[in-house]
Image: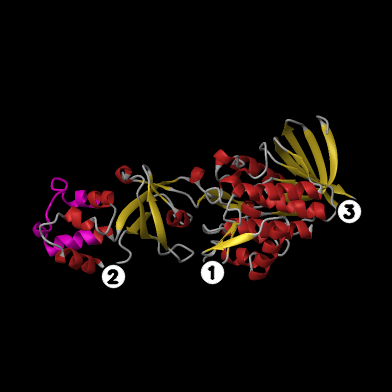
Amino acid sequence: MNNQSECIYDACVIGAGASGLVAATVLASRGFHTILIEQNKKSGRKLYATGNGRCNLANAVLSDSAYYNNSFAMSVVSKESVKEMLAWLEGIGIPLTDRQGYLYPQSMQASSVVWALTDAARLAGVEFLYECRVEDVGTKEGTGGPVYTVRCAGKQEIRITSSRLVLALGSPAAQELGAAKDRDIYRILEGLGIPYAPFQPALCPVETEEDLSELAGVRARCTLSLERPEQEPTRTSEDGELQFTDYGISGIVTFNLSTMAKEGDRFRINLLPEWKDAGAVAGFLEQVSGERSLYGALNGLLHEKICLYGIRKFYPEDTKRKLSACTREELLRIAEYLMAFPVTVKKLLGAQGQACRGGILTDSVDPATMQIRNTKGLAATGELTEVTGRCGGYNLMYAVISALRAGNSL
């Protein structure tokens, strides 16, 4: 392909993440001359970092709370479609293994997933166009319906025409891993007249109003609750591991609830989830020798940094206070604090997130085909659509299944 050239293809896919690679492979396998456009130097940059480099591709559990946009997502992701996805992945060399419901490649390496997906596309005959940014996308009338025009700039300036177009642009999450910028995504969607909701942070760490830097690095089993009972979906608490950071809180429980949070919201952290109530905790402390320090007794229940942080809230000048000096009311007050540890959302750190809320409105997408309604030859997949799943492989599972549907239907 020469600079300033115009090339004609049967199918064009924009974005070489998981869903783009899958959609392009399926289209090429059906005999369509297919090109895959990617702005980065290689495929699957975000995939390499997924699951801390182990790539949690799917989840064995499908529940009503798996996706925040439940009705549309669950019409795409079903037991049958998951079974088809697993068979397809195994067919290209990615058998999965179940680790407590989380499905990983047997290699436990994200790199093996990227290589297999890229090889599958290449072997199917997909042409790759790397380091090319899509400047604009338009349509013109062809003899059999609309023809899509894609103008790219970068290493090559090229104009592509195709009767089939798959938008697999992803979301702006994880900019450091080469994600598309929101303004570039909006420009493409607006050029095609596709309605969308602006992207918002989701599945991300939270910067808190409170200074938690002295707890940085501490991990704690907890129940995290969001004080927004009116918020949908109704699930506003998470059990699991939370990580304190120098800016606030992180970890899976934080990521899942951040998707429903906004600036100014209040989280409560129950740092003693195994205990029935504050009275039970106070009773335990009362039976410990009064000669022990409050700090020492609490240290049997919690990380020492959390103990010290909590004691300073009540006794900033007496952190070595003995249990014998504490009344039952004081012990109850400390226990209640530790079972409803308050933090306030200052900022959602979307740039460090795994996904975004927003994207193409699902009302405009046919879940059976992932095609844009009333628009021939145009489909969208994965994170670009307004679907966000919880942590645990749900987003990648949706990305692959939606791509299989798009590739098989266009």
Q: What mark, if any, has residue 276 been given in the picture?
A: 2
Left or right of residue 70, residue 221 in this image: left
Q: Is residue 382 above or below residue 154?
A: below
Q: Nearer the viewer, mark 2 or mark 3?
A: 2
Amino acid type, mark 1: Asp
Viewer-proximal residue among 366 and 399 = 399
Task: Give coordinates of residue 328: x percent, y percent.
Answer: 13, 64
Is the residue marked by circle 1 packed among few (<14), some (14-19), or many (20+) residues within 10 Å? Answer: few
Task: Give coordinates of residue 99: x percent, y percent.
Answer: 53, 62
Left or right of residue 274, residue 53 in this image: right
Quote the CA–CA distance across marks 1 and 2. 27 Å
Q: Nearer the viewer, mark 3 or mark 1?
A: 1
Is the residue marked by circle 3 packed among few (<14), some (14-19), or many (20+) residues within 10 Å? Answer: few
Amino acid type, mark 2: Lys
Indicate the secondary structure of the residue bearing disc 1.
loop
**Which residue is under mark 1?**
64
Question: What residue span does the magenta drawing correspond to?
Answer: 310-335
Q: Most prominent secondary structure in the magenta stretch? A: helix
For marks 2 and 3, the one nearer the N-term is 3
For marks 1 and 2, the one nearer the N-term is 1
**Which residue is under mark 3?**
144
Is the residue marked by circle 2 packed among few (<14), some (14-19), or many (20+) residues within 10 Å? Answer: few
Quadrant in which the C terminus appears: bottom right
The answer to whether residue 215 is magenta is no
- Identify which residue is drawn at 76% across, 31% down: 156
